[in-house]
């Protein structure tokens, strides 16, 4: 089973939060991308795009889960995959009023998950629940 490190909000994501705090609107999450490329947390912080994307899904639900956290959900299946891959990075995208769609946050796998190719018989999939939190640096 795959295991992922906590979400890291990118520099672009942090800039979007600052815009929203100044009264420029609200954050609209647009999609979730799954990549076979491994990124460190430092690379994620500076990320402006994500390479090695194997699958993308639209956000199906956004739920406030605490005073400073939201849960973003989406799902992917392998019904269109002809080649399997290891899920090494998951990225959450958002709409920036100035920059368009950005990588808002991402998380790398400590244990990558295997998404097999479709075998013509049974479908495999992943249901993604991404928690993004705004908190103090100590947290």
Image: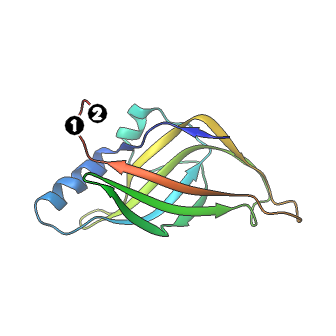
Image vertical order of residue 30 relative to residue 126, above or below: below
Image vertical order of residue 94 relative to residue 40, above or below: below
The disc at residue 139 is 2
Image location of residue 131, percent across then percent down: 41, 50
Q: Quick check: 6 left or right of 34?
A: left
Q: Quick check: 139 left or right of 54?
A: left
The disc at residue 52 is none
For the C terminus, the image quarter is top left
Q: Quick check: 121 left or right of 85?
A: right
Q: Residue at x 76, y 66 (%)?
A: 79
Front-most of residues 75 and 41: 75
Mark 2 Cα-neighbour bin, 10 Å: few <14, some 14–19, many ≥20: few
Residue corresponding to mark 1: 136
Image location of residue 104, percent across then percent down: 36, 53
Front-most of residues 49 and 33: 33
Q: Residue at x 41, y 43 (%)?
A: 7
Image location of residue 31, percent across then percent down: 47, 64
Q: Quick check: 48 left or right of 81?
A: left
Front-most of residues 43 and 120: 120
Q: CA distance from mark 2 to mark 1?
A: 6 Å
**Residue farthest to the front?**
66
For the N terminus, the image quarter is top right
Q: Quadrant of residue 94?
A: bottom left
Front-most of residues 62 and 116: 62
Question: Which structural element holds mark 2?
Answer: loop
Evaluate if marks 2 and 1 touch, with contact meaning CB atoms under 8 Å apart: yes
Count of numbered labels shown in the rendering = 2
**Residue farthest to the top?**
138
Q: Residue at x 42, y 33 (%)?
A: 41
């Amino acid at each position: 089973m795959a295991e992922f490190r906590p979400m890291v909000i990118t520099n672009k994501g942090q800039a979007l939060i600052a815009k929203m705090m100044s009264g420029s609107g609200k954050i609209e999450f647009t999609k979730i991308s799954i990549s076979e490329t491994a990124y460190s947390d430092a690379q994620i912080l500076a990320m402006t795009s994500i390479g090695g994307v194997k699958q993308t899904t639209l956000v199906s639900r956004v739920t406030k889960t605490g005073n400073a956290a939201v849960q973003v959900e989406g799902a992917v299946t392998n019904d269109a995959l002809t080649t399997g891959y290891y899920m090494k990075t998951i990225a959450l995208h958002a709409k920036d009023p100035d920059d368009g769609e950005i990588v808002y946050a991402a998380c790398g796998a400590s244990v990558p998950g295997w998404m097999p190719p479709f075998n013509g018989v049974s479908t495999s999939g992943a249901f993604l629940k991404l928690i993004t939190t705004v908190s103090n640096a100590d947290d």
